[in-house]
Amino acid sequence: LVIGSPAGIAVRVITEIYGATARSAARSTTMSPAEGAAAIDTTVVWRKWIAPAVSVLAFALVIAVLHHVLEHYHLRDIVVELRQIPAPAMVAAAVFTLSSYLLLTCYDALGVRYVGKPVPYPRIALTSFIAYAFGHNLSLAAFTGTAVRYRIYSTQGLTAIDVATIAIFCALITALGLGVLGEFGRHLTGDVA
């Protein structure tokens, strides 16, 4: 589960509630230490299956919503529409998409270099790809992408401040690039004041 995702937050809240309930029950009643330990051990058993159960429930809910939203579309219609797209256009789209993600890994590489931490480029590329894929598809890219970055970069010894600096660095570089590209487009179209 992604840190900060709704499912991740739900799992964390539920496990905290069950954990706090068992601990307070063990303290507040007149239990022997062995009975209190048994109550806490029961909580451990609950914690082992509650997170997967919540995940499966969230997955089932997502599948149900997708089924409801997509029930008017049939696979054969989608395949027919995809086949109408010329092959060169599909190849160009794939090349531009791969190029875009490759350039985005360079943003992260520059950010990691800026914070001065030694992280190998393959790890940076994987982290960047996953962070941007989640961020672009789940919205709130600043939060979801940063949560993914923290989860992966923390295993490389980066602190939360380092990850936040990388995320801000990447956002600023993206904003700067979009500004330059927008201005270049205005000059190409002759829409200059």
Image (cartoon, rainbow, N blue to C red):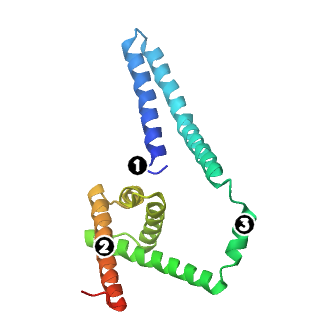
* Secondary structure beneath label 1: loop
Q: Label 3 is placed on what type of residue? A: Asp
- Is 165 or 81 nearer to us in this picture? 81
At x 55% / y 38%, what residue is drawn?
A: 54
69 with respect to 153 (left or right): right
At x 32% / y 64%, what residue is drawn?
A: 167
Point out residue 35 in the picture as x, y percentages from the top left corner: 47, 15
Using the image, tell me which numbered label, if any, was put on residue 4. Answer: 1
At x 66% / y 84%, what residue is drawn?
A: 87
Point out residue 115 in the picture as x, y percentages from the top left corner: 26, 68
Q: Label 1 is placed on what type of residue? A: Gly
Q: Which residue is mark 3?
A: 77
- Is 69 or 7 nearer to us in this picture? 69
Kindly indicate the quadrant of the structure image that contains residue 188.
bottom left
Density class for disc 3 (Cα within 10 Å; few <14, some 14-19, many ≥20) is few
* Secondary structure beneath label 3: helix
- Is 129 or 185 nearer to us in this picture? 185
**Disc nearer the start of the sequence (1/2):** 1
Point out residue 138 in the picture as x, y percentages from the top left corner: 47, 57
134 with respect to 185 (left or right): right
* Direction left: furthest residue: 193
177 with respect to 125 (left or right): left
**Disc nearer the start of the sequence (3/1):** 1
Point out residue 25 in the picture as x, y percentages from the top left corner: 41, 17
Q: Which residue is mark 2?
A: 175
Density class for disc 2 (Cα within 10 Å; few <14, some 14-19, many ≥20) is few
Which quadrant: the C terminus?
bottom left
**Disc nearer the start of the sequence (3/2):** 3
Q: Label 2 is placed on what type of residue? A: Ala
For the residues marked 1 and 2, what is the alpha-carbon distance in whole angstroms? 24 Å
